[in-house]
Amino acid sequence: AQKVTQAQTEISVVEKEDVTLDCVYETRDTTYYLFWYKQPPSGELVFLIRRNSFDEQNEISGRYSWNFQKSTSSFNFTITASQVVDSAVYFCALRSVRDDKIIFGKGTRLHILP
Amino acid sequence: KAGVTQTPRYLIKTRGQQVTLSCSPISGHRSVSWYQQTPGQGLQFLFEYFSETQRNKGNFPGRFSGRQFSNSRSEMNVSTLELGDSALYLCASSLDSGKLDEQYFGPGTRLTVT
């Protein structure tokens, strides 16, 4: 069975601190995609990044960076120099190419305190 | 261009009733997906429609159904409502089917079943 675990249900950090959101996944498939989404208070999910199972190259995009490690089945997301506008719920998700269904983690609610 | 719109934004229904939610995708988008978000179960994929055909379906009972019209607008129907159907229902559209990283989400319809 496929599973996505976001162990951190809620995190609070002071503005300008760095914060890492953890994501651990389980799948028997060899080809899959991993995603991070952001859900601000308005409710609309916003796509942040996609990684496929063959691409372990980590990426930095502005203040965001991602660490994908197949050996530990983890796909962590880091915000550096956090800002109040980063406050949101962040979801990690897994999609198997085999059945094309997407599984979401329960989300991590991030509070950036001014 | 206009984003994904969902109507109504809020809805209160009584157990046993049925409900229809509507989603208008971004102009030119042919794929529409539906998701249910609850505090207990989190974010779950309901189904995806592409060119008026259901392309994929999550693990939900037959009470949950949908359809897509020739203009790509989609409706989701839930019959014989249960208290557990209270949730935020999110709709997302994309140009093509299966393009989860290119989905744009609407603000959702919050359904309360009493």
Image: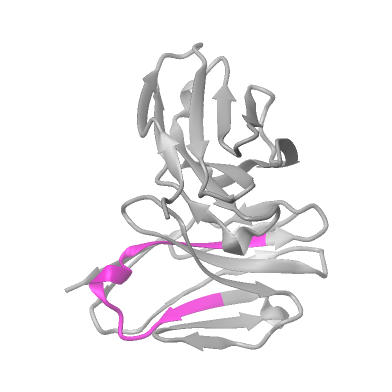
Count of numbered circles in the view: 0
Could you say where residue B8 lies in the image, as x and y percent from the top left? 39, 30
The quarter of the rendered structure image containing the C terminus of chain A is bottom left
**Residue drawn at 64 percent across, 27 percent down:** B65
**Residue drawn at 49 percent across, 12 percent down:** B17
| B44 over A28 or under it: above or below | above
Q: Which of B96 and A64 is in front in this view?
A: B96
Q: Residue B51, located in which quarter of the rendered image?
A: top right
Could you say where residue B2 lies in the image, as x and y percent from the top left? 41, 51
**Residue drawn at 51 percent across, 55 percent down:** B104
| B7 over B102 or under it: above or below | above
Residue A57 in view (yes/no): yes
**Residue drawn at 70 percent across, 55 percent down:** B98
Could you say where residue B31 lies in the image, as x and y percent from the top left? 64, 47
Which span is picked out in magenta? A76-94
Residue A5 in view (yes/no): no
Could you say where residue A38 lies in the image, as x and y percent from the top left? 44, 63
Residue furthest top in the image: B16
Within the magenta stretch, is there residue A75?
no
The quarter of the rendered structure image containing the N terminus of chain A is bottom right
Q: Residue A108, located in which quarter of the rendered image?
A: bottom left
Within the magenta stretch, is there residue A93?
yes
| A12 over A61 or under it: above or below | above
| B14 over A50 or under it: above or below | above
Q: Residue A15, located in which quarter of the rendered image?
A: bottom left
